[in-house]
Amino acid sequence: GQSLEQPSEVTAVEGAIVQINCTYQTSGFYGLSWYQQHDGGAPTFLSYNALDGLEETGRFSSFLSRSDSYGYLLLQELQMKDSASYFCAVGGGFKTIFGAGTRLFVKA
Amino acid sequence: NAGVTQTPKFQVLKTGQSMTLQCAQDMNHEYMSWYRQDPGMGLRLIHYSVGAGITDQGEVPNGYNVSRSTTEDFPLRLLSAAPSQTSVYFCASKLGAATDTQYFGPGTRLTVL
């Protein structure tokens, strides 16, 4: 089967850096994705790692270690609008399985 | 370019009723999928399709049917609604297996009484 684990909640202050970890167990692995979802909204794609290492997109970075079945999303210069849920997801070809999500609270 | 569209946005059903949730995309994506999201939980894959005429089951397929007669449309049918199917339903599409960039529709909020 496939499973992903990520913390249920993280709280940080505006301007800070926060890291959201994700560990996974999967049969068949193409890559690790991250999605953001604001309350009442639809998930939106943030990043995708198919290979080991760090991918940077503006204030957001994502890291993958395939040997450790581990990845993380790094959010820098936190803003209030970053308060949302963040989901890691593993893609195994045609199926994408999502974690339960991490709720990020950004405080002023 | 509308992306992924879903109708209706809200729906209330009585137990035992059937209905179809509509999903369409105009990006010529081969891969489409349906997810349900329950409060405080992630998205669970119901069914997916890798192209017109090809569908397969996801994690939680029971009580749902799908078909894919065209590249653009991927409707989800609830055969006999149950309160356990109260959820938010998202349709998503992506270009193919080599990418995991999925584009989600706005969702359908379904309540089964």
Image (cartoon, helix red, strand yellow):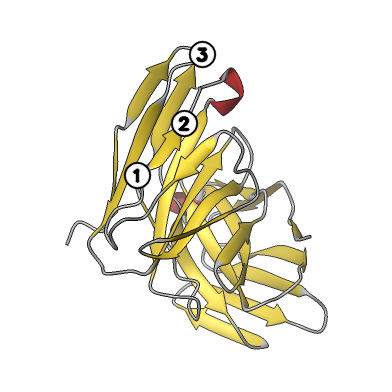
Q: Secondary structure at mark 3?
A: loop
Give percent across and percent down for residue A86.
Answer: 57, 55
Tag 2 and tag 1 share a subunit: yes
Q: Nearer the viewer, residue A55 or A12?
A: A55
User: Quick check: B67 above or below A71?
Assistant: above
In which chain is the residue bearing label 1? B
Q: Which mark is residue B78?
A: 2
Judged left or right of residue B57, residue A44 is left
Give percent across and percent down for residue A67.
Answer: 81, 84
In which chain is the residue bearing label 2? B
Q: Which mark is residue B15?
A: 3
Tag 3 and tag 1 share a subunit: yes
Q: Secondary structure at mark 1?
A: loop
**Mark 2–mark 1 distance (CA, rounded to whole Å):** 19 Å
Does residue B29 appear in this view?
Answer: yes
**Mark 3–mark 1 distance (CA, rounded to whole Å):** 25 Å
**Mark 2–mark 3 distance (CA, rounded to whole Å):** 11 Å
Residue lying furthest right in this view?
A: A68
Give the mark nearer the N terminus: 2 vs 1: 2
Label 2 Cα crowd, 10 Å radius (few <14 / some 14-19 / many 20+):
some
Q: Which residue is mark 1?
A: B106
Give percent across and percent down for residue A102.
Answer: 65, 50
In which chain is the residue bearing label 3? B
Give the mark nearer the N terminus: 2 vs 3: 3
The number of callouts visible is 3
Q: Nearer the viewer, residue B3 or A53?
A: B3
Q: Amino acid at mark 1?
A: Pro
Q: Amino acid at mark 2?
A: Leu
The residue mark sitting in front, 2 or 1, is 2
Q: Amino acid at mark 3?
A: Thr
